[in-house]
Amino acid sequence: MKSLFLITLLIIAISTHNYAQEFARYFTDGSLRVDYMHTANDKIEIISLDELYHEPYWGGSQINLIDTFNYGNYKIEVIDSNSNTLIYSRGYSSLCAEWIFTPEAKTTSRSFSESVVMPFPKNKVKILFYKRQKNQTWQSIFQLIVDPKSYSIIPQQKTKIKSFNIHNSGKSSEKLDLVILAEGYTEGEMQKFMNDAIRFKDTLLSWKPFKQYVNQLNFWVVPTPSPESGTDIPGEGVFVNTIFDSHFYTFGTERYLNTTNNVAVRNAASNAPYDQIYILVNTAKYGGAGIYNYYSICTADHPNSGFVFAHEFGHAFAGLADEYYTSEVAVDGIYDLSVEPWEPNISTLVNFDQKWKALVTPQTPVPTPASETNKNIVGAFEGGGYLAKGIFRPSLDCSMKSIIHNQFCPVCSKAIQDRIKFYLH
């Protein structure tokens, strides 16, 4: 038995060494940040290059470089030009992906600043950008050749602020790294921000399934001061001067808190190794947002801010969809009910086998009646993704549906666990 154990350890060591060699073959220290403008309306989308940066940190895995989840409204594929090898890929979403489903997009076009980040390449690479069509197929929309030796790549950080590690579990390449940025905190409120960040870190780590991965997550904070305290509330005529220009009433929805100042956010986040960005806003008003592999944002001082912090992280980190269908939203017509949506916790039942059918017991009816007797089981309950009909959710209730603390359903919990494990190498 001892010999078998030693052989297993040897195999793991060899495998890890080979992956490390593969990373070193294609990448070097730091990360490549590609800033671009995303211009769109409800019919067309155009991407144009803005800036390229060589940033000091790469917070992601050095092993799991190819995306295996197929989540997001967009994805990039990075091809090494010397060998024509796919060396990196990631799915993600953006604010623009939501805006094209608003009434405004039917009458005008808008431009959004966006970024993608990858390990810094050693050789010239081709970056391919894809958009997910409503029928779930991918469409190529842009490609870019990047020479890592080009003088057009900006080598210095635009915003240098000392970051602090408030929860250290180990090497960033082997852990999930979350960076928390201060929004609407003045210089004199930085201690409040640090206390708030620690409070929300503790909240997230108290929720299942995150609590079982306490030693697998790193939390960083970047104390980014604002000239004024708070955030914009346009519907109430409130406008303040803050570092990320955050605001409520995004797309006309009061509670939808967001920012379009992507460059300032990315400049601040570059001060720490990160896999996920969280923007903490210094106000007591209820609100937030979470966009897959893009960022999360929430307010600090509402009684339900702890819930919002975890709920929005469910969107941004695990790709979870909203499971509610009665609240006001700014978008319409997102889902094609003839195909399965990409989010792991909603289904049209068109191909339920590829969703969570394996977690449904044989005696459970599908669709599942929304009755008190079924409140603690996994099934397929109609209503989710902002639609009362045609989309189904896994549980009668869940923290992705209602304001209930620490109650991710088994399907949402599994999606979160799968994503955490992706970073633990």
Image (cartoon, rainbow, N blue to C red):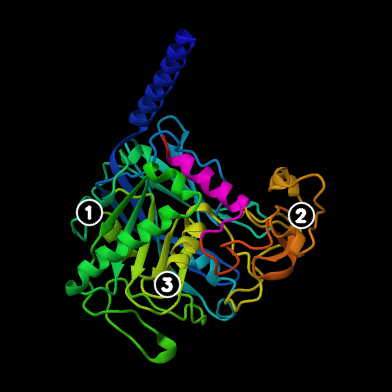
- Magenta segment's dominant SS is helix
Nearest to the eye among marks 3 and 1: give it.
1
Residue 1: give x, y in percent of width and height.
Answer: 50, 10
Residue 398 location, quadrant: bottom right
Range of magenta residues: 406-423
Residue 124: give x, y in percent of width and height.
Answer: 36, 39
In the structure shown, which secondary structural element does the residue marked by tag 1 occupy? strand
Instruction: Give the mark nearer the N terminus: 2 vs 1.
Output: 1
Which class describes the residues within 10 Å of circle 2: few (<14), some (14-19), or many (20+)? many
In the structure shown, which secondary structural element does the residue marked by tag 2 occupy? loop
Determine the residue positioned at 46% across, 49% down: 210
Instruction: Give the mark nearer the N terminus: 2 vs 3.
Output: 3
Q: Please say if the residues under marks 2 and 1 sit with CB atoms less than 8 Å apart.
A: no
Q: Of the residues shown, which amino acid type is indicated by label 3?
A: Asn
User: Which quadrant would the C terminus be assigned to in this image?
Assistant: top left
Determine the residue positioned at 62% across, 50% down: 411
Determine the residue positioned at 57% across, 67% down: 44
Q: Residue under label 2, please give it.
A: 349
Q: Residue under label 3, please give it.
A: 258
In the structure shown, which secondary structural element does the residue marked by tag 3 occupy? loop
Q: Is residue 253 left or right of residue 57?
A: right
